[in-house]
Image: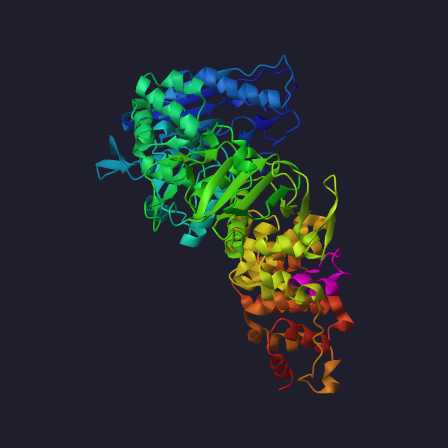
Amino acid sequence: MNDKFQKRNSTDKREDKVEFIEAGERKTHDHDIETKPDQVHHLDEDIQCSSDSDKFPANDILDVVVEDTKSATSKVSDDPVVEILKLLQDKADKLKLESDENVPLTVMDFAGQFAFYTTHQTFLTERAIYLLVSNISEQVTDTVKDDCYFDADGIQLCKVYELVEVWLNSIHSCSPNPEADFPPVILVGTHVDKIPQVIPYSLLEKLNQEGTVNIESREELDLFLRFQHDIGNILYFGTKELKEQIMLDPQWLIHALRTLITAEDFILKRVKKPTVIRKWREFSKTGKLTQELIDAIWTKEEHKEILDNKDHILPLMEKLNIITRPRSYSEDQMEVKVENYFLAPCMLRQTTPKEIISPDPHPEIENSPVLCCVFIEKFLPSPIFHRLIASCLSHWPIAEKKSENLIFCGCCVFDVDPCQKLTLYLRGHVIFARVSKMSLEKKTPDSKVCIYVKKCIDENLLNIIGCLSQKLMFEWYIQCPKTERDLLDGIFSMSQLQASKQLFCTFHDKGHIVVPQDLLKFWVEDKKTQGEDEGDIAFLFTDILDRIPTECDLGRLSMKIGKEFFVLGLHLGLSSANIEQIRLDHLHTVTQCLMILVKWKLESGDKATFRNLEMAFRSAYIDIDILTTITASGECASCLPPRMLDMQVDESHLNQLCNGIGKEYVHLGVELGVPVSRIEQIRIGWPNDVSRQCFEIMNEWKQTKAMQATFRNLELAVRHVGIDPSILRQCFS
């Protein structure tokens, strides 16, 4: 074992040497933490390193540091010994060093200009940790203002990345083994606060093209950005409105938001003008956010960058449903216009008047039964309702009474059309919705309007929840007409109503009969409630409702669902990020749908039943007749001679079939009983060779099923996935 890595007793003293190197007029720094030959010890006494293969444990000594500084030098260079000692002490604490062990440091700080480059060589050694510091607010292609003289070409003006390469090469030239990972170099970025917080997508594409390691396509770049968004490093939304801007620091957005969406104590500390304070207090009461108030708060010098990015921040706040531009009818009620101010439902403090939630009977107003969205876990974070209100405000104008907007804390009234209003309010973990119609003939609300309202609420809730990490599930109920509208009891589930012709309501002092059709006709399309098909479906599936579908069942269903698979995935509890990832990983819609169903099954465990799948179908407005595909027998006349049906399939047959199967090969594998996890392994193993993937999947079936891998079973599977069974004949041509 090399003596420089010998294991020492725990009582030995340890000493490190740190050097700082400044490079160029821009004060870009290199920091070199160096230890002398007789002073190198491990922080972890259990580690032993050989000179041939083991590497100096740099990651166990010091983490990468990205400094945020407002000065021309980093925090490390302000007091380097203290900062490095703190970092090493933190590591020592994590590694549980003995309390009597010391880690003394020797620090060297080199000037970085080229004139000093020759003197540096005397001190460079393999037994060191280097901090290579660069001003990351500059472009890597910027020219450094320092004259360099490397060779016979004389004076050279180097770019930032070229000088970084010079230092890296100089440092690693100290190592006797070119393949070794030491001496370790830690890249440190300074001037983070000077980096633009919002950059255009086009700039990122340009930087990607200029880099040495490129992301090959725009689709892969989008995937990279979405991944960074999901883990919290950046904010990037792939929508048409926001796709062209990337926010580098989510914390910066949090700071921007709290300058507006904040408590009064904070606004009083930051704002001194009485007129601005008065406008903000009006905003905190009514939720009305004007452009004048935004500019008044963001014109302060400390918020200059926020104001410069106003045109990106405000649309982003709209995307997050924190604020929204309300709609209103024109004076003749013939057109809907967008107001020039914002509403922030989360700021509303005014209590909802009781007559809004529980109106007295009116001779010219008829109300629908109250629709109830009940959250299963009996908990609903209020911000989700605030976002729902903001989203609905982008659909319908806000109703008015005596020129006052009917929007309150936990409640809002919308003009769905000039004669019909929607009242949406929150109580506990239940969202209530009621449509009211004004008519001299006392006509009931239009069922088409009610169904459209339910669909909008449903889709908006799913989109809001899908963007969050919280797994919140909800079910639809309808309230008994005799229940007082400010109570949480007296509600029937949709499935309960759809399965019965009449129910006995026991929620009141006097029990009474409820006719489900009288309630369902407002909120569910007639074809789902009045036809005979519904009863037939329920009868067919009574014996399997609580069964967990197989992957083969899911494969058959996925071929029938179509483009509604995205909404179905949201109803099944998958996040929009998960669904987007599946869409990127798989090209074909049918395969995307299959993978969504498989992911739901894996995540839901014993709750992944046909009963819950049927509920999701109904919520996503997908024809539940599709569920009958799982019972299809597939029995029909064979296209092969009888003598060949029970013949076993061999590898030569598979080679002949692979080119003719096409994009349905994944579904064919599932139908043949190959696990989806194994199919995914095969796809990863041969990512660009579809024919080879098909062969390996079918060969997996052949090897697993052995004697059952016959042409009879293969033909049944081929028919189920919609492949022309005549392709099997080429095996005998």
Position of residue 415 in the picture relative to residue 638 (left or right): left
Residue 287: image location, x then y, percent: 42, 31
Q: Nearer the viewer, residue 730 or 571?
A: 571
Q: Nearer the viewer, residue 37 or 160?
A: 160
Q: Look at the image and give the residue range highlighted in magenta.
A: 537-555
> Can residue 124 be seen by looking at this rendering?
no
Residue 599: image location, x then y, percent: 63, 52
Position of residue 209 in the picture relative to residue 491 (left or right): left
The residue positioned 37% from the left and 32% from the top of the image is: 289
For residue 452, above or below residue 376: below
The residue positioned 41% from the left and 32% from the top of the image is: 253
Residue 176: image location, x then y, percent: 48, 36
Quadrant of the image containing the C terminus:
bottom right
For residue 703, above or below residue 388: below
Quadrant of the image containing the N terminus:
top right
The residue positioned 53% from the left and 17% from the top of the image is: 15
**Quadrant in which residue 266 is drawn:** top left
